[in-house]
Image: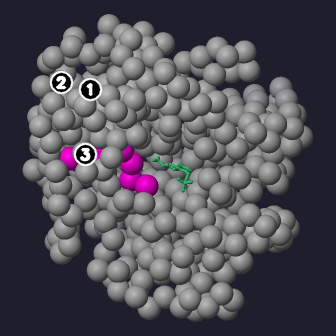
């Protein structure tokens, strides 16, 4: 089996602590069995997210030192603007403070009450913004998407027949836009193919519908397209990026993920859409030359986006994730396959098959894993959903613990430690009980909710 190779060397380090297990148990109780509420000094390997925590390159750090602070006409913004428009091949770029800020403005402007936003899969913040504006999310993923173990190379594809049926039943006027998420976050960072996007475009053209692309996790999706899709074998990463962007009307991204900085942005060739969004930027984000980002972050993104076009850079996360996933599978631990982007995903339903979804098996597994190893993962299951209008639990399609792979952060020996501890936990899985809420927030409850053992 392929062993991943780090295509970089470590030049700045951050010391880690590995607390004794008794102290980890105490820290977990104090955090209300919610890994979001753990303190970083108590965490050994932080695999909560890849958001804003990917390693930066020497070139990014250097660029941050020459940032131009001027409020208007800043050179820093000009550099970012030119780079984004070059990479996505678009006329217009608007800066925003992060990915969900893009979702806020796009939903405010384009989601009308009682309309539908079809998508290949929802993301927590994107769905919350659509729902708050009176819209409804319809997920039209392919059947393979929810199979924990599959050979399908593009589990993030949209089901074209379901899209056509949805339009036929509801009428195109009931559809705000079609949202495509690169590297579907909640079902294991599974990519869509360029071919699938081309088919979605065709249907949208037939009905005058816009495609909005969430490119936050585009880097992994680009790697998978290049690796797995016949028509793209000879294309460069930059060519694939432009081909994707050219099929979409609006592209937005969280630069906490794409570009390895902090911030976000929206790009488009549609002047009308651009003018509408532009009006809201100074109101909600900041002036048009920073949109809530610091100049240093913008410099880092400019360099980070260019580095994302390098295959030896974007292969790091998928290759480490594949190694971890394959090694766990060999040891009998239930994981999502094929390995996707973003992170390694444990299947908590199978791992803890003695717990019903109402006892939050994914939350329980994330808490137990921290106690057993000092590793912080993230619940991606029913806790990450919210109750419906009648207060009834919406059970998630999948109960996952996501072990995100921040880019170029962990070494192979650390990943081996994770594999060893997860395997131990699997062998002792009957020790793990369920959870119940102590304090349950109404919106995005997984962020601050506190729980206790059931
Ligand atoms: N879209 C996707 C696909 C994301 O993964 C995220 C963030 C966002 C939008 C929102 O971007 O955080 O900059 O506001 N995902 C993070 C995660 C939070 O940990 O998966 P943001």
Quarter-of-image position of residue 423: top left
Q: Within the image, what quadrant is residue 432 found in? A: top left
User: Which residue is painted at 50% across and 31% down in the image?
Assistant: 449
Can you give x and y, in whole percent of width and height, for residue 32 in the image? 39, 29
Task: Locate the C terminus by quadrant.
Answer: top left
Residue in the picture at 25% in, 31% down: 26
Q: Which residue is rendered at x = 53% and y = 25% of the image?
A: 439
> Which residue is rendered at x = 18% and y = 24% of the image?
425
Dot 2 falls on a residue whose secondary structure is helix
227 and 69: which is toward the camera: 69
Horizontally, is 286 left or right of 372 in the view?
Answer: right
Label 2: which residue? 425
Specify the principal SS of the magenta part: loop
Looking at the image, is mark 3 or mark 1 earlier in the sequence? 3
Mark 1 touches mark 2? (CB < 8 Å): yes
Q: Please indicate, yes or no, whether residue 232 appears anywhere in the rendered image.
A: no
- Whether residue 272 sits left or right of residue 325 in the image: it is right
* Mark carried by residue 43: 3
Q: Which colour scheme is used?
A: one colour
User: CA–CA distance between discs 3 and 1?
Assistant: 13 Å
The answer to whether the residue labelled 3 contacts the one labelled 1, judged by CB atoms less than 8 Å apart, is no
Q: In which quarter of the image is the N terminus?
A: top left
- Looking at the image, which is closer to me, 73 or 236? 73
Q: Nearer the viewer, mark 1 or mark 2?
A: 1
| Magenta stretch in the rendered image | 44-51
- The kind of secondary structure element at disc 3 is loop
Q: Is residue 93 visible?
A: yes
Estimate the x, y position of residue 387 in percent, counting from the top left: 63, 22
Q: Name the residue under label 1.
A: 368
Is 275 rendered above or below residue 157?
below
């Amino acid at each position: 089996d392929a062993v991943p190779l780090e295509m970089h060397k470590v030049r700045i380090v951050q010391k880690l602590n590995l607390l004794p297990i008794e102290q980890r148990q105490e820290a977990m109780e104090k955090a209300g069995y919610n890994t979001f509420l753990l303190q970083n000094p108590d965490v050994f390997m932080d695999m909560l997210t890849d958001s804003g925590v990917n390693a930066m390159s020497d070139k990014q750090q250097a660029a941050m030192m020459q940032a131009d602070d001027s409020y208007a006409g800043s050179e820093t913004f000009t550099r970012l603007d030119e780079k984004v428009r070059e990479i996505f091949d678009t006329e217009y770029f608007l800066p925003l403070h992060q990915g969900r800020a893009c979702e806020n403005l796009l939903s405010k402007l384009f989601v009308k009450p009682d309309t539908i936003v079809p998508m290949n899969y929802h993301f927590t913040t994107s769905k919350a913004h659509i729902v708050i504006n009176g819209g409804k999310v319809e997920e039209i993923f392919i059947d393979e998407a929810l199979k924990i173990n599959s050979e399908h190379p593009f589990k993030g594809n949209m089901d074209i027949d379901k899209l056509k049926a949805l339009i036929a039943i509801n009428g195109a006027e009931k559809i705000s836009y079609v949202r495509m998420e690169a590297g579907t976050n909640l079902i294991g960072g599974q990519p869509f193919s360029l071919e699938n996007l081309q088919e979605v475009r065709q249907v949208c053209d037939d009905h005058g519908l816009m495609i909005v692309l969430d490119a936050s996790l585009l880097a992994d999706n680009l790697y998978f397209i290049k690796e797995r899709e016949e028509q793209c074998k000879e294309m460069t990463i930059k060519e694939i990026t432009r081909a994707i962007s050219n099929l979409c009307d609006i592209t937005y991204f969280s630069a906490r993920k794409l570009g390895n900085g902090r911030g976000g942005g929206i790009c488009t060739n549609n002047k009308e859409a651009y003018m509408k969004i532009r009006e809201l930027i100074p109101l909600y984000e900041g002036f048009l030359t920073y949109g809530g980002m610091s100049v240093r972050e913008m410099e880092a993104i400019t360099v980070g986006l260019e580095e994302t076009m390098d295959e030896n850079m974007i292969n790091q996360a998928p290759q480490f994730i594949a190694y971890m996933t394959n090694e766990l599978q060999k040891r009998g631990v239930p994981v999502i396959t094929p390995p996707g982007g973003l992170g390694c995903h444990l299947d908590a339903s199978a791992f803890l098959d003695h717990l019903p979804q109402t006892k939050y098996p994914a939350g329980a597994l994330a808490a137990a894993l921290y106690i057993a190893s000092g590793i912080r993962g993230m619940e991606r299951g029913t806790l990450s959903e919210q109750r419906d209008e009648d207060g009834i639990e919406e059970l998630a399609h999948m109960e996952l613990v996501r072990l995100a792979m921040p880019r170029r952060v962990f070494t192979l020996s650390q990943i081996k430690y994770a594999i060893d501890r997860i395997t131990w936990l699997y062998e002792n899985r009957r020790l793990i009980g369920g959870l119940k809420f102590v304090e349950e927030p109404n919106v995005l409850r997984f962020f601050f909710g506190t729980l206790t053992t059931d």
